[in-house]
Image (cartoon, rainbow, N blue to C red):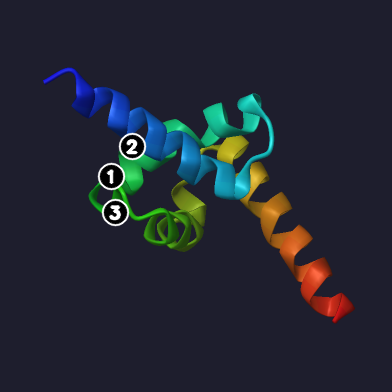
Amino acid sequence: MKSAPLALFVVLIGTASAFAETGAERAACTPDVMRLCASQIPNAGAITLCLRENRVALSSACRTVVDRSDRSKGNIANRR
């Protein structure tokens, strides 16, 4: 079944996009999604929450992306 790996790749890229804006940022989090949050695939919201809940176990590159995203969202929320 060749479509399963492709579908998984699309889900991971979409999920990583919740945090990441560049290809490098998406690439930084994809291994962490597979390692820590694979059971949450294909639910992008659950994967996002999983990454936040497992922040201490994230690679330093993905942790930077998640932290940057959280700070950005905090800044937007504080403007309201």
The crowding category of the residue bearing disc 1, from other C-alpha atoms within 10 Å (few below 14, some 14 to 19, many at least 20), is some
Residues 30 and 62: in front is: 30
Q: Are marks 2 and 1 in contact (CB under 8 Å)?
A: yes
Judging by the rendered image, the residue that carries numbered circle 3 is 40
Query: Which mark, residue 71?
Result: none
- Give the label on residue 34, or none: 2
Which residue sits at x=41%, y=37%? Answer: 12
N-terminal-most mark, 2 or 3: 2
Residue 16 in the figure: left or right of residue 35? right
Q: Residues under labels 2 and 1: Cα distance?
A: 5 Å
In percent of width and height, residue 58 lies at 49, 44
Task: Determine the residue located farthest toward the right in the rendered image.
Answer: 79
User: For numbered disc 1, what is the local secondary structure?
Assistant: helix
User: Is the Cβ of the residue at disc 3 closer than 8 Å to that at disc 1?
Assistant: yes
Q: Residue farthest to the front? A: 3
Query: Where does the C terminus fall, quadrant-wise?
Result: bottom right
Amino acid bearing label 3: Gln
Q: Give the residue number, with chain letter if any, for mark 1.
A: 38
Task: Tell me the element at label 3.
Answer: helix
User: Does residue 6 sit above or below 64 in this rendering?
Assistant: above
Which of discs 2 and 3 lies nearer the camera? The answer is 3
